[in-house]
Image (spheres, grey):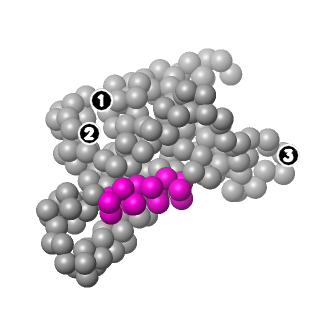
Amino acid sequence: MQTQNPEVVKQQFRDLFNSVLPNLHAYIARQCEPSEVEDLAADVMSAVYQHWDRAPATLEQQRMWVFGFARNKLLELRRKKRYGASLLTKIGSQANTDTTRFDNQINANDRVKRLLAQLPEKECEVIYLTVFAGFNSTETAQILGITPSAVTTRAARARQHLKTILEAEGKDQ
């Protein structure tokens, strides 16, 4: 539980915000449309601030706590999309013959999203947290509320699924 002195709370939140924002953006960007990243990150940090009285004591624990909020916001976004919310237009979906480096990055990101979307949700979460957010197995386990060995198992299954998907794509081409 955090100190409730308003100035101390502001500084603690500022420290957390500055520490976590680049990784949070990267984590979110790998899982949603580019136009959604800023709003989702703002929603996450707003929720964190609203629940600051329950924040863990150390900055490292707070960083993991933030990714728990991010995970929940992303799950909420996926549910909205699944239940009929309109899909946002994908940037770069209409390729032209003069593809720029930026377009190539967008297409690569779209491919990664498409491949990961084919994984079971639990495996996908582990990949996003370990590969894209940079958490280790213990931290990922804490965020997801599972054991570190479950993280390792899910990551191994995800790699096997991705290998199978990529092999099947290779045969189709």
Please check the rendered image and state whether residue 46 is part of the magenta-colored stretch, yes or no. yes
Along the horizontal axis of the image, is 72 left or right of 110?
Answer: left
Marks 2 and 3, how far apart at CA: 43 Å
Alpha-carbon neighbours of circle 1 within 10 Å: few (<14), some, or many (≥20)? some
Q: Position of residue 30 (x, y in %)?
A: 50, 46
Residue wearing tag 2: 144
Q: Which amino acid does label 3 sit on?
A: Thr
Q: Which residue was labeled with disc 3?
A: 97
Q: Name the residue nearer the viewer: 55 or 26.
A: 55
Residue 51 seen anywhere in this rendered image of the structure: yes
Q: What element carries label 2?
A: helix
Point 52% across, 51% down: residue: 29
Q: Which of marks 1 and 2 is in front?
A: 2
* Between discs 2 and 3, the one toward the N terminus: 3
User: Label 2 crowding class (10 Å Cα cut-off): few <14, some 14-19, many 20+?
Assistant: some
- Label 1 and label 2: CA atoms lie apart by 12 Å
Query: In screen coordinates, is 149 left or right of 69?
Result: left
Residue picked out by circle 1: 154
Please give the range of residues in magenta: 37-50
Q: Main secondary structure of the magenta part?
A: helix
